[in-house]
Amino acid sequence: MPKLGPIKRKQLVRHLRQQDFDGPFGGGNHSFMKRGSLKVRVPNTDIDRELLRRILRQVGISESEWESLD
């Protein structure tokens, strides 16, 4: 269960894939992941807590849902 805090890029990608996102795909300075028409930028570095919150808000995952993921 991931905590809502700093996370490695690799872990974020793994958890987004569990939520049916495809990718990451190359896209200039940042790669991105897609689910249907939703496209989310994924930084090429580790992600701090505030950025993780913004990403989760974009993809529609609540903090409690995030912390209940494997």
Image (cartoon, rainbow, N blue to C red):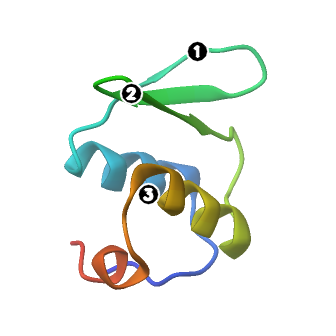
Q: Residues within 10 Å of mark 1 (few under 14, many from 20)?
A: few
Asked which secondary structure carries label 2, the reply is strand
Picture residue at 69% right of the left edge, 38% below the top: 44
Label 3 amino acid?
Answer: Gln
The amino acid type of the residue labelled 2 equals Lys
Of the two numbered discs 2 and 1 on the same chain, state the one appearing first in sequence.
Answer: 1
Looking at the rendered image, the disc whose residue lies closer to the viewer, 1 or 3, is 1
Mark in the foreground, 2 or 1: 2
For residue 26, side relative to residue 51 (left or right): left
Is 33 displayed left or right of 20 in the figure?
right
Q: Which residue is mark 2?
A: 34
| Foreground label between 2 and 3 | 2
- The residue lying at 38 percent from left, 27 percent from top is 34
**Residue at the location (44% across, 57% down)?**
11
Can you identify the residue that label 3 sits on? Answer: 11
Q: Residues within 10 Å of mark 3 (few under 14, many from 20)?
A: few
